[in-house]
């Protein structure tokens, strides 16, 4: 099942990238010092907003989140956010999520976890 989900995610990512106009490919991106994420505990309904600096790791509930990078369009700092992160559940050596997540399309590469949802709100540029 996981292999099919990963294959579907790859196909969707490729389709989105292929559909992007050529001008979008020429845009430059800048890295932010931090990102704002939202974590939902599906069992308790608790929502936590989290500001995390690039390179730092924070814990929320049973999750450990490491932010690798937060990128945004250089000419539009309040534009879309692209976050690279690793999310681990408890002491499980296999990450619950590892990769890039896009603020405007979190379902494109979503974290698939039975208890938690994590999504990107924005890059913190100031």
Image (cartoon, grey):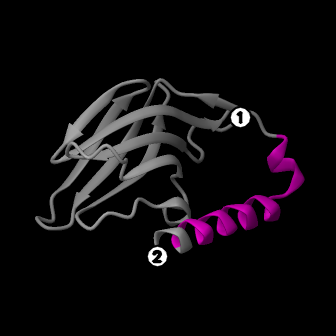
Report the span colored magenta. Answer: 5-26
At x 65% / y 63%, what residue is drawn?
A: 10
Structural distance between the alpha carbons of marks 2 and 1: 40 Å
Left or right, residue 4 beside residue 56: right
Q: Which mark is residue 1?
A: 2
Q: Is residue 93 magenta?
A: no
Which element carries disc 2, helix, strand or loop? loop
Measured as percent of width and height from the top left, residue 108 is found at: 56, 64
As displayed, is residue 124 above or below residue 3?
A: above
The count of marks equals 2
Q: Residues within 10 Å of mark 1 (few under 14, many from 20)?
A: few
Per the image, the residue denoted by label 1 is 75
Left or right, residue 117 beside residue 101: left
Q: Residues within 10 Å of mark 2 (few under 14, many from 20)?
A: few
At x 71% / y 34%, what residue is drawn?
A: 75
Q: Is residue 24 magenta?
A: yes
- For this rendering, which residue is in front, 18 or 6? 6
At x 42% / y 33%, what residue is drawn?
A: 67
Name the magenta segment's main secondary structure: helix
Measured as percent of width and height from the top left, residue 41 is found at: 19, 60
Identify the image quadrant of residue 115: bottom left
Measured as percent of width and height from the top left, residue 46 is found at: 15, 59
Identify the image quadrant of residue 72: top right
Which element carries disc 1, helix, strand or loop? loop
As displayed, is residue 69 above or below residue 36?
A: above
- For this rendering, which residue is in front, 123 or 91? 91
Q: Earlier in the sequence, mark 2 or mark 1?
A: 2
Q: Which mark is residue 96?
A: none
Left or right, residue 106 beside residue 114: right
Identify the image quadrant of residue 7: bottom right
Q: Residue furthest right?
A: 22
């Amino acid at each position: 099942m996981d292999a099919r989900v990963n294959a579907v995610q790859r196909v969707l990512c490729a389709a989105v990238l292929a559909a992007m106009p050529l001008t979008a490919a020429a845009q430059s991106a800048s890295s932010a010092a931090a990102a704002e994420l939202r974590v939902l505990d599906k069992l308790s309904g608790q929502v936590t907003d989290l500001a995390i600096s690039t390179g730092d790791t924070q814990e929320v509930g049973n999750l450990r989140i490491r932010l690798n990078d937060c990128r945004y369009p250089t000419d539009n700092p309040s534009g879309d956010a692209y976050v690279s992160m690793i999310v681990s559940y408890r002491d499980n050596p296999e990450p619950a999520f590892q990769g890039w997540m896009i603020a405007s399309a979190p379902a494109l590469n979503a974290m698939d976890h039975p208890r938690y949802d994590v999504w990107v709100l924005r890059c913190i540029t100031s």
